[in-house]
Image (spheres, rainbow, N blue to C red):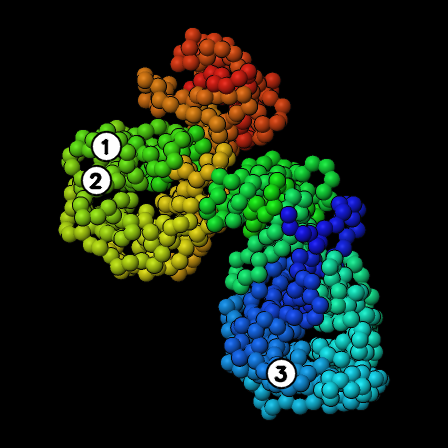
Amino acid sequence: MKTKSFLLTLAAVLSGSMFAQNPIISNMFTPDPAPFVYGDKVYLFVDHDEEGSTYFHMKDWMLYSTEDMVNWTYLGTMITTETFAWAKHGDRAWASQGVERNGKWYWYVCCNTASGGDALAVAVADDPQGPWTDAIGGPLAEGFGFIDPTVFIDDDGKAYLFWGNKGLWYGELNDDMVSFRNGWQEVPGYHDPECFGELQMKENWANGGKKELMTQYEEGPWLVKRNGTYILSYPAGGVPEHMAYSTAPTINGPWTYRGRIMDEAENSFTIHGGNITFQGRDFMFYHNGALPGGGGFCRSACVEEFRWNDDGSFPFIPQTKEGVVTPVKNLDPYSRVEAETQAESRGLKVDRRDGKDHFVTNISDGDWIRVRSVDFKDCGQKAVIVVVGEQKGKGTIEFYTDNMEGEPFCKVPVNRDNAGFPTAAFTYLIDSDVQGVHDVYIVFRCETPEPFTFDWWQFNAHANMPVVQTRFTADPAPVVINDKVYLYTTHDEDGARGFQMFDWLLYTSDDMVNWQDHGAVASLDDFKYYDGKNGAWAEQVVAANGAYYMYCPIHGHGIGVLTSDSPYGPFYDPIGEPLVWQKEHWDDIDPTVLIDDDGQAYMYWGNPNVYSVKLGKDMISLDGPITKHPKIEDYQEGPWIWKHDGHYYLAFASTCCPEGIGYAMSEGPEGPWEYKGHIMDHTVRTRGNHPGIIEFQGKNYVFGLNYDIMHLKTFAHAEQRSVSVAEMHYNEDGTIQEVPYFIDNVVEQVAPFNPFRRVEAETMAWGYGLKTTRLENGVVDEDGVAVTNMYVHDIDDGEYILLRGVDFGRKGAKKMLASVGSDGIGCIEVHLDSPESPAVAVFTINATGGKTNFSTLTRRFKKRIRGTHDLYLVFTGAGKDLFTFDWWRMK
């Protein structure tokens, strides 16, 4: 069992509104804080005291950030002494400061040369999270006491560097920020008590440690300018240090000592700090030794808010445990929150890596994170996502508001089903109603230490789940016909581990949220030349010549084509052989077809290579040779070709795994193709993807796939995928705006749902747990038009069908009809807007002579239902498979 150096009793953290904000970083020792304001964020550059240190043996520098001044995000251990090849490695990584100028970032540090001398160094990067490199390949300046650099950029754009211990030096930097314009010199007045405080006896290490009379200035300068006055704050008074300051009318002085700002730090003989103005408020940073295990060589960053005196002088700033009481802003839980974003934690660590991806480590039972001032707004939570990695065991992540007493409002089980993958995303549907602003405690429960690492978390006020929940669907191929979207998909069999795919399915919608299941419209059996039982992979259907053509890959046997007079099928094979089959490889999968404005049709396909060919006017023959295209950046498989505003687009599943959705553009249907980026980025939340893109009712949509329905039951990896959709937007230049992951989007209903007609029971926005199947005997509606002969079965107690945006109109509905089949007893409860609302009608279902012997029942509402509502049909009864459900209608 690992030793917990930071454990506190629960009683210390269950005290309601009082809290210990200082130190601001509780899982690492972080001395010498150097804040820098950039846009709406504060970057905090710090050193790192190793646990248990008995001297300043420091190896690296770290970076944190905040947008609210109470929750701090670890951004990585960006540079180490090894960053500087000429430096002494593994020691003396002392105080630093980072700034941005003209699009470049500069990190000024102090370290030792290989021979042990004090030196200043500078690293440079294009991004604060690196990569950082040695800017000049040697020291910026060398000399005894050359430590603690601070950089200041004046109003006229001139930059200056100040530094020094037992001495104070400065120099103007060139525009390159990595060299001095005219060398450096001692700050005028350094030895004058009028400038830097009364003389006192100190050990002068530059003179062999002999005691000499020296001014109050000790080390760690920090320079700001306010109302035309230069203000230099610094640790003062020898050991232990307090914080004092001097002012000057110019950068060159003369300096005037102004007195003490802050007393000696708790449990630390040093007190290095610096102040900033952020979002109209002023803050002073410093360090102390107050963390458990802390001390003079294990120090931690702290912060206090203050207000300048009316005359522009510093006030005296008390040190508090509360720190910043009122956040600058609230934290948004409906966006990705890094696990390493914390106001406080106990028992945990963060990785000590560079780069942009970081995570929480060292997790054991009872460890916790506190995140302050989380604004859940006035909406409930429908889903929670947590992402973990390095799974070696299982556990639970619990979410509490304000304290860790009582029951958590959300629990996320983390099992080992996904062990073996570097990261795993756990998405759970929840029905939580936390509103307003709260502190959130994240508590870990586990039987064994370090069962996993924790990457990030997020709540969703909505849950844009896959469009089909009753089957596993993949490889979406949407097409708009008249005022309806026809969504053709492949079909992953229930219980499949690998790709078990035998047929192709069809779903339709005229509002983008309620989808009707039409069952299988084609299968491998329709290709008489193929006697295999598996391989019904990604297809696409297009309309041409008054007919419908389905291009189907049969894995390992090329690409076939089927045709029909109706988009609902039946489809048949018009040529009796593959349309394309390059037998020298297995690249011939995932066809996509574009019919250009001049009537010429083009087919693209391929994994991992991209191929295309012109199709004949009959759509079932080739009109020219096959072209193999140059490799498109990030291309993997699943191309989708379309045209918009004169631009040609090729979307595709981007490099596996996990796959995103990338795209390329061209000025012609045959290329060349220029890679443009992602429509949806790679994410651990889905292993695979496959695009399908349409314009419908004035909006653009990207379809894809994920494993979110399977993940409601298990996170063991299997090929049980589900089609999802999100709205997509073009930029003015024709490029495409990146779309968040599917569940994070809101797909708006584009047309009201009409209940005053026969509605097939297999039409739904949500129906998890239910199944659909085809009736042997077809049926017709009141107008004699054939309707899909499907019904809903496998109905268990508590399951329900949701239909969104049902428009009952101004006159409203007086009664409802429902066609059901049963050999037992059950009920259908009719609810509006929530499955928990009072039922407006209840159908009691008795035996009808069998589950495929349907009987029509009628129930009157107590009062007319008017307006637009979400409609919940909730099934109740004892046990499982209660009855079957064919259709319903309002009157």
Horizontal and vertical percent position of residue 269: 78, 71
Q: Is residue 874 above or below residue 57?
A: above
Report the amino acid beneath label 1.
Gly
- The residue under label 3 is 117
- The residue under label 2 is 557
Residue 532 disc label: 1
Q: In the structure shown, which secondary structural element does the residue marked by tag 3 occupy?
A: loop
Q: Earlier in the sequence, mark 1 or mark 3?
A: 3
Report the amino acid beneath label 3.
Gly
Q: Is residue 406 above or below residue 421?
A: above
Q: Residues within 10 Å of mark 3 (few under 14, many from 20)?
A: some
Which residue does the image show at 53% across and 73% down from the upper left?
Answer: 83
In this orientation, does residue 274 appear?
yes
Q: Is residue 347 above or below residue 316?
A: above
- Real-space Cα separation, disc 1 to disc 2, in angstroms: 10 Å
Q: Is residue 161 above or below residue 330?
A: below
Between 113 and 666, the one nearer to me in the picture? 113
Q: Nearer the viewer, mark 1 or mark 3?
A: 3
Residue 671 horizontal side relative to residue 754, left or right: left
Horizontal and vertical percent position of residue 21: 74, 57
Which residue does the image show at 77% across and 68% down from the upper left?
Answer: 268
Between 329 and 581, the one nearer to me in the picture? 581
Q: Nearer the viewer, mark 2 or mark 3?
A: 3
